[in-house]
Image (cartoon, grey):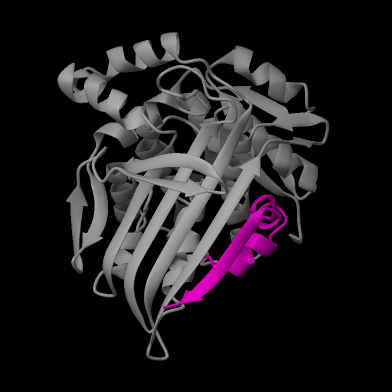
Amino acid sequence: MTSQCRSITILGAGHIGFAMALLLARSGDYDVLVADRDVARLKAVAALGLQTLATPDEAALQKAIHGRYAVLNALPFHCAVDVATQCVQAGVHYFDLTEDVQSTQAIRALAKGARSVLMPQCGLAPGFIGIVGNDLARRFDELHSLRMLVGALPRYPQGALRYNLTWSTEGLINEYCNPCEAIVDGQATTVAALDGLETFALDGVEYEAFNTSGGLGTLTETLAGKARQVDYKSIRYPGHCAILKLLLNDLRLRDRRDLLKEIFEAAIPTTEQDVIVVFASASGLRDGRLVQDSYSARIVGAEVTGQRLSAIQRTTAAGICTALDLVAQGRLPQQGFVGQETVALQDFLGNRFGQAYATECAGETVAA
């Protein structure tokens, strides 16, 4: 528990911002202010009895940031660098959910000499999956391969895509279009999004997985020179990748992302009946033996203080709230850039917010 009630600003009152506000307010240790330029979005947060602030311009945004203990940024990824810059100038801790590699690199550069924490990529992937991957990697004397797969999926898929929108459409398109960081044959490199298609079954359900951007966070830097193969893939139901390649490559919609966003949001329904599937596997040498360790989790929505949260709301909000909590408790560095792999998996799962993952996960070791 924190020793005092700390003032927190959440930027963005969408589904994830709402979940973050709910979790932090329920803890009793944070004085929560939620800011958004869309006044209509703030109504749901205000109904929880929390402070809200409309931020239609730069002056209002600065008011939301200055004098706070920390800012949790749930805005679209293209807002990340500007908000982080203002937090550095104000000496305010900064956390976000971005999957955008360039934004994270820019924030890392900002952190040099900063007197506050800058901790981007605090969601599910990037975020929790990097913590899991690093925990698996540290178990080996010699790490050969590390595979990480994550899916935010509808529980009742329909249509040819067998997919529903559960989070940011802009972030989704970013993952499908941008180069993907990986380690191949011991060298840090990039691979193409949508490549590396594989199929597998988990708990009797058939899935496919393929390369997407941003899920590894800074893990490729951490494991450079320590692993032969490291990659991250998104999980979908079979058939999804083929349709994406038609849209993005054959119809060249990767060059018209605004149009692609419009098509997705007009044609693909949103759903709160979702499931998060996490699977990570590592192999290598331990005590001279070839061993494989794995980790899996399946997480669905739940009711929190009378409010129904979807699986993606639970997991994403749990990630960033845990990061904040560990900094507030002094269990993470107190200034500069903090990567997700700085967080110990045991500390994450033992945290009051991180327990959203702990109750529904499993791991095993297989000796070859």
Q: Quadrant of residue 323?
A: bottom right
Q: Check the image and report above or below for 138 versus 174.
A: below
Question: As rendered, which of 200 and 2 lies closer to the eye?
Answer: 200
Q: Residue at 49% of width from left, 17% of height from top?
A: 56
**Image coordinates for residue 53, horizontal then vertical, percent:** 62, 24
Question: As rendered, which of 35 and 213 lies closer to the eye?
Answer: 213
Q: Residue furthest right?
A: 306
28 part of magenta stretch: no
351 part of magenta stretch: yes
**Image coordinates for residue 296, horizontal then vertical, percent:** 55, 56
Q: Which residues are magenta?
A: 343-368
Q: Residue furthest front?
A: 204
Q: Residue at 42% of width from left, 24% of height from top?
A: 169
Q: Is residue 196 visible?
A: yes
Question: As rendered, which of 135 and 206 lies closer to the eye?
Answer: 206
Viewed as shown, does residue 261 lie left or right of 357? left
